[in-house]
Amino acid sequence: MKTIVLGIGNLILRDDGVGIHVANEVKKQINNPDVTVDEAITGGMNLLDLLLGYDKAILIDAVKSDDGAHGEVRRIPIKEFSTMHSCNPHDVSLIEAIDMAKKLGESRIPKEIIIIGVMMRKIPCEFGEDLSDKIAAAVPEAVKLTLNEIKKDMKISS
């Protein structure tokens, strides 16, 4: 099973870069040719393009949430995810991109897309490379959930 793990965000916008911080930690612990770990500073159609051809995609990102505790980490199947921001105001959300691609007959969309979300009341847009204390404390849990998601598929496919 070919899996892609993408840390999403922007490293110079403090907590918005949490997905990339998590992906960098995951990358240190994965040595499997069927698992690609990378980062993305994009959304919508560009993000979908990065996922094509994989069986499974695990996206790690900051998620604005009014019902989750700030810094809480959640595993969210794409079917239960309402929106994912795009850096480009002229782009569509990932969910809209997937729907459009399916209608156009795209067959290379991953069968399973999981979001490892770090919940935030507000995703700050302040410059800086360090994470706030609360979000930095969530990184180990997000790494653990991501590794568990990867290991689950390794057991199934071996």
Image: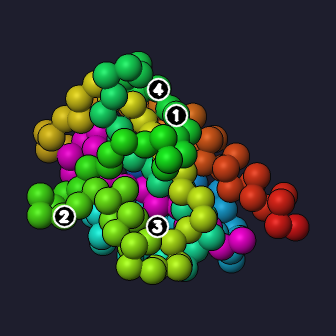
* Coloring applied to the structure: rainbow
Mark 1 vs 2, N-terminal side: 1
- Residue neighbourhood size for the residue with mark 4, other residues' Cα within 10 Å, grouped as few (<14), some (14–19), many (≥20): some
Residue 135, x across and y down, in percent: 38, 31
Q: Give the labeled residue for mark 1.
A: 74
Whichever of callouts 3 and 4 sits on the residue coming sooner in the sequence is 3
Residue 129 vs residue 5, the one in the foreground: 5
Does the rendering let one see residue 26?
A: yes
Label whose residue precedes the other's in the sequence (2 or 3): 3
Asked whether disc 4 touches disc 2, contact meaning CB atoms under 8 Å apart, the reply is no
Is 128 left, or right, of 63 in this rendering?
left
Of callouts 1 and 3, which one flags the residue occurring earlier in the amino acid sequence? Answer: 3
Amino acid at dot 3: Asp
Mark 3 against mark 4, which lies toward the viewer?
Answer: 4
* Residue displayed at 41% across by 22% down: 68
Give the magenta part as a residue range. Answer: 1-17
Image quadrant assignment for residue 105: bottom left
In this rendering, the label closer to the viewer, 4 or 2: 2
Q: Residue at x 67, y 50 (%)?
A: 149
Helix, strand or loop at mark 1:
strand
Task: Decide if residue 21 is on the left or right side of residue 90.
Answer: right
Amino acid carrying label 2: it is Asp
Disc 2: which residue: 91
* Residue 72 image label: 4
Please, is residue 112 above or below residue 101 in the view?
A: above
Quarter in which the N terminus is drawn: bottom right
Question: How far, Cα to Cα, is label 1 from label 3?
Answer: 20 Å
